[in-house]
Image: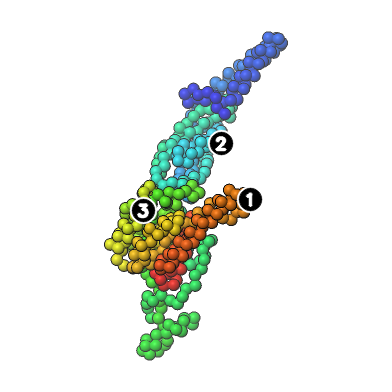
Amino acid sequence: MIRKYIGDLFIHTHWYLLMLGCVVLFFISFFAPLLYNPAIVAAACLFGCTVIDYALLFFAAGGIAAHRQMAARFSIGDENKVTIELDNRYPFKVKCSVIDEIPFQFQVRDFLIETVIKYRAKTQLSYTLRPLTRGKFGFGVVVCYTSSPIGLLKRRFNIAEPEEIKVYPAFQQLRKYQLMAVTGSAVAGTKKVRRLGHSMEFEKIKDYVQGDDVRTINWKATARSTSLMVNTYTDARQQQIYCLIDKGRNMKMPFEGMTLLDHSINASLALLNVALLKQDKAGLITYANKIGDIVAADRRGDQLHRILETLYKTQTEFKETDYEAVWSAVHRGITQRSLILVFTNFESYSSLERQLPFLKKIAQRHLACVVFFQNTLLKEIHETNPDSIEGIYIKTIADQFDLEKRLIVKELRRHGILSILTTPQNLSIDVINKYLELKARQMV
């Protein structure tokens, strides 16, 4: 605990306690004169130790240096590591109380790390931050309160320069989902889809080896050769995958500290990364009351970076979504049949009815899939057993909303529109699963 501030000097609580002891000793010496000389000695020792402590901290060669180490950018919703490297340049062991001025967005008001550093040594202090919004975050200085082995005084060092860092969509999770595209192995929460037949995209003719499917034997090539020849096929490539992200007011709803828009952005980034690894073209459209950013479908080397930068800037707009503008943009800008995933949120059947005509028009020319969210709070209420009239009313309303969600799925299916009804925490897994399923069924 630190009591008084004098420039860069802070007086420790220990000093005040010892000074209080000297005062009490002097007071008692009025009634017991034999304690007067010990009180003088104690006060002199305290004064001498204070002078020595001050000299060690302010006049001894050395000091404390620090350097903050962290990634060039943070990933939203993930744990991002920050490391502070402290360098003790004093010729003695020091005790440090380190305070990092964390960005105000985290609302961390009690950050403090205590450590002891040996003389002429270095140490590292690490902690993690989990940002829940995208944008620029500003770190301040690192404040280090240093005390010598005497421990009566503290010296403050303002070390490590202020710096700014950007928080991007959850790019840290991309590596986990890449396994699904590269190896086809199951990741926690994923499901395997049986591949039906083979893709119709021809690759080459090769010699038959044991284990090849006899149904792929090319009899014409075999007749011209002295050995059996078989056709080989590869996954259909160069298909267009578009994510249409609704950034209207219905996507402002929070879940685990992040908005539905942020969850949709993270899922879109993961999906489009898998699509690029599958040799498909990835594209993006954001919309609200009007069309926002458009990234044309492509698979060039910097496509994922362009998508990431576009998603970084995307923010919620508190306006009603205009699906007529969405259909118009799709009609004019996407001429090739594509898989279009519409990330939005329909809370009621009536909200779907207003937008259904435009979704049907999109589905006439493309393979459309609407991605919307389950209300997890209503799901919890639905699973409870109420014991009061009020609880029964609340459960009835929750059941009604749950029924409408299922009616939305049924109505979309009736018009040939695919749908994914999921929770925010399962969004990325469910969307990638759907994409891989459609690829296996040769629908994309």
Q: Is residue 385 visible?
A: yes
Q: Is residue 216 left or right of residue 25?
A: left
User: Could you say which is closer to the camera, residue 204 or residue 299?
Assistant: 299
Residue found at x 61% / y 52%: 386
Task: Measure the alpha-carbon separation of dots 3 and 1.
Answer: 40 Å
- Secondary structure under badge 1? loop
Q: Amino acid at mark 2?
A: Glu
Q: Is residue 376 left or right of residue 360?
A: right
User: Could you say which is closer to the camera, residue 267 or residue 399?
Assistant: 399
Number of labels in the image equals 3
Where residue 408 appears, as percent x and y from the top left, is 45, 61
Q: Indicate the quadrant where residue 216 lies.
A: bottom left
Q: Which residue is mark 3?
A: 321
Q: Residue furthest left?
A: 332
Residue found at x 59% / y 22%: 16
Sequence-wise first label, 2 or 1: 2
Graded by Cα atoms within 10 Å as few (under 14), some (14 to 19) or many (20 or more), the crowding at tag 2 reads few
The C terminus - image quarter: bottom left
The N terminus - image quarter: top right
Q: Amino acid at mark 1?
A: Asp
Identify the disc placed on residue 114: 2
Task: Measure the alpha-carbon separation of dots 2 and 1.
Answer: 51 Å
Q: Which residue is mark 1?
A: 387
